[in-house]
């Protein structure tokens, strides 16, 4: 799956999975990053922040950035932020705060900053609460240390933003009785198969027509605000159609109403987001996707969701009739687990890039994952990885997985499949899989360290295959 869009989208799924009135905040930003002497790339950032330490103003965030305006649709990067947020003038101006932080992540794409993919971004912002949101303005510095676009590898520029805070994040001294509690029904995790039928005027970035249908694999997380209205956070990556590396990240609102009691619901939604890669001309990256369909109950906790709609890139030359089929699940045992992982690929000697070149000895990727316990032996997961070292900076993956503990010993066997692409990596049409074996070491009552080794390769062609070593922090 192209770029770190999958990483960014997984971050969006993290956001809605853990956001509630007692936990943290959603932070959104917009800024122009220079790409050349004549071109800026309008970039949107989306993050979820928590203050993990009691009586501390230090926060940790997960999220990423993607191209939204300009002509670099398909640039994405995702990672983590360490920051400091403190109110500075409550006695003079209620709700005025200062926010400083450093983001580190991997990604790239759209030939904006080719190279290893590492992105560093520091910020210093003023933040003012206005009602239920907070507005932000300040300065940021972006760096791409291993890019070949050396003239613009770093830049300092202004940034604006908005925060949707919770009072527990901003005002930890307030009691729970003062918090806003949202009534919502069960959230839904939905693996999705999606298909584009490009319109007759749909183009590639080079001007050629898009004539073949395009298949994508995706992941949706739907967070219900009330019994009918929900927020949707979605990510997709190409798995067939000759556009490996194309991906998109969306967020939007939907309405789900009952048609046949406890059997069939009517569903309509509108999503906006960022998309690009795979040679598809999405212009600056903005994409709009209205959809309509049904939500059909199969069994307790399981629903099938067929939908039909359109996808538009307003600043590009792409539009398509869009169909999707999702399988939603609201079951599971216990709480959702979150993970930050570093994955190392050691490519086989026979592996070659799309241009026939050799890979670096080691390719490093940063990943985020959420998982849910099915029973005492089985856990299912959704993960995203973006490269930050190894000269394949636009490469990223989105994976679904299952992990089994077959014995009483602390041994775990895992299998993941999904999509990967970008960065010149030769993974065929984009379908990939990997298997691992590993263990976990407890660090505290709520956190552990995972260590896994295994193999990864494409499922439908491509020369890339590699040994895998990954280490993760799970809580």
Image: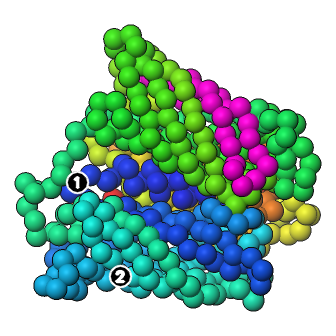
Q: Do tag 2 and tag 1 residues touch (Cβ < 8 Å)?
A: no
Residue 452 percent coordinates (x, y): 52, 58
- Residue 76's place in the image compared with 463, above or below, is below
466 to the left or right of 461:
left
Residue 314 belongs to magenta span: yes
- Magenta range is 302-326
Label 2 SS = strand
Q: Callout 1: 10 Å neighbours few (<14), some, many (20+)? A: some
Instruction: Residue 319: tell me if it is visible.
Output: yes
Residue closest to the eye, 12 or 434: 12
Mark 2 or mark 1: which comes first in sequence? 1
Look at discs 2 and 1 and give the one toward the viewer: 2
Residue closest to the eye, 127 or 109: 127
Residue occupying the point 45% across, 21% down: 266
213 to the left or right of 94:
right
Q: Main secondary structure of the magenta part?
A: strand
Residue occupying the point 69% across, 75% down: 40
Residue closest to the eye, 232 or 378: 232
Residue 83 percent coordinates (x, y): 37, 79
289 to the left or right of 327:
right
Q: Callout 2: 10 Å neighbours few (<14), some, many (20+)? A: many
Residue 85 percent coordinates (x, y): 30, 79
Please state, as top left, top right, bottom left or bottom right, where the C terminus lies in the image: bottom left
Residue 420 belongs to magenta span: no
Q: Which residue is mark 2?
A: 126
Q: Which residue is mark 1?
A: 21
């Amino acid at each position: 799956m192209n770029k770190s869009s999958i990483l960014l989208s997984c971050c969006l799924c993290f956001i809605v999975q853990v956001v509630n009135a007692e936990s943290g905040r959603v932070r959104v930003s917009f800024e122009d990053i220079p790409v050349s002497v004549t071109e800026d790339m309008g970039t949107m950032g989306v993050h979820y922040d928590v203050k993990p330490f009691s009586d501390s103003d230090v926060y940790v965030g997960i999220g990423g950035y993607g191209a939204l305006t300009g002509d670099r649709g398909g640039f994405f990067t995702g990672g983590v932020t360490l920051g400091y947020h403190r109110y500075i003038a409550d006695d003079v101006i209620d709700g005025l705060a200062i926010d400083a932080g450093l983001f580190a992540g991997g990604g790239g794409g759209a030939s904006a900053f080719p190279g290893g993919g590492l992105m560093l971004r520091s910020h210093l912002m003023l933040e003012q609460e206005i009602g239920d949101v907070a507005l932000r303005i300040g300065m940021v510095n972006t760096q791409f240390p291993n890019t070949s676009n050396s003239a613009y590898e770093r830049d300092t520029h202004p940034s604006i933003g908005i925060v949707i805070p919770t009072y527990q994040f901003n005002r930890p001294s307030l009691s729970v009785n003062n918090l806003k509690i949202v009534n919502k029904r069960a959230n839904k995790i939905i693996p999705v198969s999606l298909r584009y039928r490009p319109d007759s005027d749909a183009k590639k970035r080079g001007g050629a027509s898009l004539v073949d249908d395009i298949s994508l694999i995706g992941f949706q997380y739907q967070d219900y605000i009330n019994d009918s209205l929900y927020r949707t956070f979605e990510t997709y990556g190409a798995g067939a159609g000759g556009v490996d590396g194309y991906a998109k990240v969306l967020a939007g609102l939907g309405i789900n109403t009952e048609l046949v009691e406890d059997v069939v619901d009517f569903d309509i939604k509108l999503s906006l987001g960022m998309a690009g890669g795979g040679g598809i001309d999405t212009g600056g990256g903005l994409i709009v996707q209205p959809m309509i369909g049904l939500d059909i109950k199969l069994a307790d906790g399981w629903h099938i969701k067929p939908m039909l709609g359109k996808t538009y890139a307003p600043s590009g030359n792409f539009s398509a009739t869009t169909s999707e089929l999702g399988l939603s699940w609201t079951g599971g045992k216990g709480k959702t687990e979150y993970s930050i992982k570093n994955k190392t690929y050691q490519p086989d000697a026979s592996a070659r890039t799309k241009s026939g070149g050799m890979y670096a000895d080691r390719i490093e990727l940063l990943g985020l994952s959420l998982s849910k316990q099915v029973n005492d032996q089985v856990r299912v997961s959704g993960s995203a990885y973006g490269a930050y070292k190894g000269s394949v900076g636009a490469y990223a993956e989105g994976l679904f997985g299952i992990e089994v503990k077959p014995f009483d010993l602390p041994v775990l066997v895992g299998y993941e499949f999904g999509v990967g692409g970008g960065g010149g990596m030769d993974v065929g049409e984009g379908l990939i899989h990997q298997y691992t074996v590993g263990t976990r070491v407890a660090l505290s009552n709520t956190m552990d360290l995972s260590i896994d080794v295994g193999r990864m390769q494409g499922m439908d062609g491509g020369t890339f295959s590699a040994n895998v070593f990954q280490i993760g922090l799970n809580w």
